[in-house]
Amino acid sequence: MNVYLFELKMYKKSIIIWSVAISFWIIFYMAFYPMIGGDSVDFDAIMADFPEEFSAMFGINSDLPVSSVLGYFSLTFSMAQIPIAIQAANYGFSSLSVEERELTADFLLSKPVKRKTIIISKFLAALTSLTIVNIFIWISSIVAINIFKGDNTVSMDYVYILLSSIVFFQLFFLSVGMVISVSIKKVASVLSFSMAFALGLYIVNTFALIFSSDLIGYISPYSHFNPAYILVEGHYHPLYTVISFLVIIGSLFMSYFLYIRRNIHSL
């Protein structure tokens, strides 16, 4: 039994839905840029009247005005990070708990396949699925920027750096979702868990921005891979990146060892 191909086949419909939904999200929001960019002076004046807390809540950076192409893309991308996180968390919570939840664990574990092969195959299938969606996000982002930038000149180097952060952002939610799913007795509702986890960390990031708190920002991957920061600085935040990598690696190792030793119930 090829667990990897079986799991990948199970993700087929999900890959299509998430690819279309997130790509549409990005293109739809970027389509409004010509109206904002065409009246940039008035728009920037309006934004300046809003409280700093409001701007921080949406990740708006004073060094990257929303009236600029990259500033507007930063805002668009920060919103797109929410469904990206929900999908990755959904895969994390479901991949190792689906057999227990659907009472099919006996069927899987009765096959001549070791548990370590199962968990590695499940992880790789989820990662492959996320990567396919990731490719569509890259394409839709690059196409949207080039279509709606108008006469503005845009350096794409920093955009590519931002887009390359998606895989690490996805891995954070995937790996933490996996370790949580094998640490608790049963994941009753995968979608509810995924949305609560993704939105909860988004709210944490909002507080980190409002209060300008690095300490709070340590907790949230939205802070670790903040679009405005990357598009202004041209690189990831060094300390936040290290924290993300440690969380990802630690979560994957914990998931592996907990799953190997887990008493899996089916009936």
Image (cartoon, helix red, strand yellow):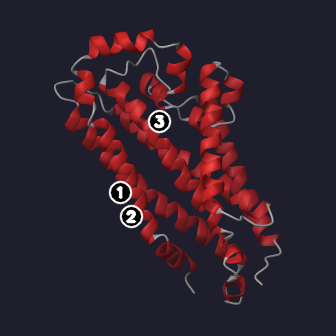
- In the figure, 212 relative to 77: above or below? above
The structure residue drawn at horizontal position 73% and vertical position 57%, both measured from the top left corner, is 180
The structure residue drawn at horizontal position 35% and vertical position 43%, both measured from the top left corner, is 26
Figure quadrant of residue 152: top left
Where is mark 2, residue-wise?
Answer: 16
Please state which amino acid type lies under the numbered disc 2.
Answer: Ile
Q: Is residue 261 left or right of residue 104?
A: right
Structural crowding at the residue carrying mark 3, measured as other residues with C-alpha within 10 Å and reported as few (<14), some (14–19) or many (≥20) = some
Q: Position of residue 51 (x, y in %)?
A: 52, 13
- In the figure, 215 relative to 104: above or below? above
The foreground one among 92 and 240 is 92
Mark number, residue 20: 1
Mark 3 and mark 2 lie on one chain; the one further toward the N terminus is 2
Residue 22 appears in the picture as rendered? yes
Q: Is residue 153 left or right of residue 47?
A: left
Separation of marks 2 and 1 at Cα, in angstroms: 6 Å
**Element type where label 2 sits in the image:** helix
Mark number, residue 78: 3
**Element type where label 1 sits in the image:** helix
The structure residue drawn at horizontal position 30% and vertical position 36%, both measured from the top left corner, is 30
Please state which amino acid type lies under the numbered disc 3.
Answer: Ser
